[in-house]
Image (spheres, rainbow, N blue to C red):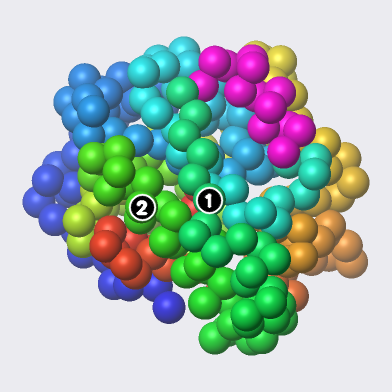
Amino acid sequence: MSTTTRIAPEAELLSAELARLKAGERLKLLHERYGKRLVASTSFGLQSAIMLDLIARNAPEIPVVFIDTGYHFPETYRYAEELIQRFGTDLRVYHPTYSAARIEALWGKLWEQGLEGMAKYATLTKIEPMDRALRELGTDVWISGLRRSQSSSRVERPFAEQQKKTLKVYPILDWADAQVAFHMREHGLPSHPLEVEGFVTMGDWHSTKPAADGLDAESTRFNGEKYECGLHLDSGNSDFQI
């Protein structure tokens, strides 16, 4: 359900420029160039400490949006508080218009209702709140921690791409897993509490499970459905990775 991504001239030039820089330099350039048009996002997942650390070191003025779906693991909420205190993040929390209880009362467990149900769930709990955040903050340049090594579908992803109204940028797009692990160790960054329990990716509690029996990261989400929700409201973004 992802929208088609087009490489606009500005995004193509920016992508080439970012490719020559290190991650911290990319963030500094983005903040200098776009200022208040710029926002980052986080899910407080397994590797979220990386982007929050890089932002704190290089452009702490950048606001960071957290979409609280109402279905995160308790450990994720506690991990979020730990990281916020550590980095002094300018965190902006956005919630779905519908509460978790209201969603289940009206539509049941959407995540168990196939691709159509998952699409509706994504729209209600992730897409609409993020679109609202972009509008209310007056931002149209969105920093995401997406990396090419996380999925085979991202190997050709550029560092910047225009997705309708939003310019989406990926400062650590080219980081391999080994580089992530090294940065975590070098700077003493805390790991997500569920990582030691075998989780290799992190999402809502009802649709994420630990890796076992050779499962790859993509297979631990949504019962192995190869699914990534796409932003299809005002911003028109695809690949909702925060």
Residue drawn at (21%, 20%) of the image: 32
SS assignment at label 2 = helix
The amino acid type of the residue labelled 2 equals Arg
Residue drawn at (66%, 54%) of the image: 70
User: Where is 117 relative to 212, above or below?
Assistant: below
Q: Is residue 48 magenta?
A: no
Q: Looking at the rendering, which quadrant does residue 237 occupy?
A: bottom left
Query: Mark 1 and mark 2 in contact (Cβ < 8 Å)?
Result: no
Q: Total label count?
A: 2
Location of residue 180 in the rendering, given as x and y in whole percent from the top left corner: 61, 32
Q: Which one is earlier in the sequence, the residue at label 2 or at label 1?
A: 1
Location of residue 170 in the rendering, given as x and y in whole percent from the top left corner: 39, 42
Near mark 2 (Cα within 10 A), the count class, few <14, some 14-19 or many ≥20, is some
Location of residue 63 in the rendering, given as x and y in whole percent from the top left corner: 40, 28
**Which residue in the protein does label 2 denote?**
132
Near mark 1 (Cα within 10 A), the count class, few <14, some 14-19 or many ≥20, is some
Residue drawn at (28%, 59%) of the image: 235
The amino acid type of the residue labelled 1 equals His
User: Where is 200 relative to 110, above or below?
Assistant: above
- Looking at the image, residue 35 sits to the left or right of residue 68; the answer is left
User: Can residue 106 be seen by looking at this rendering?
Assistant: yes
Which span is picked out in magenta? 77-89
- Looking at the image, residue 27 sits to the left or right of residue 210; the answer is left
Per the model, the C-alpha gap separating discs 2 and 1 is: 10 Å
The front one of 71 and 39 is 71
User: Can residue 141 be seen by looking at this rendering?
Assistant: no
**Which residue in the protein does label 1 denote?**
95
Q: Main secondary structure of the magenta part?
A: helix
The front one of 77 and 7 is 77
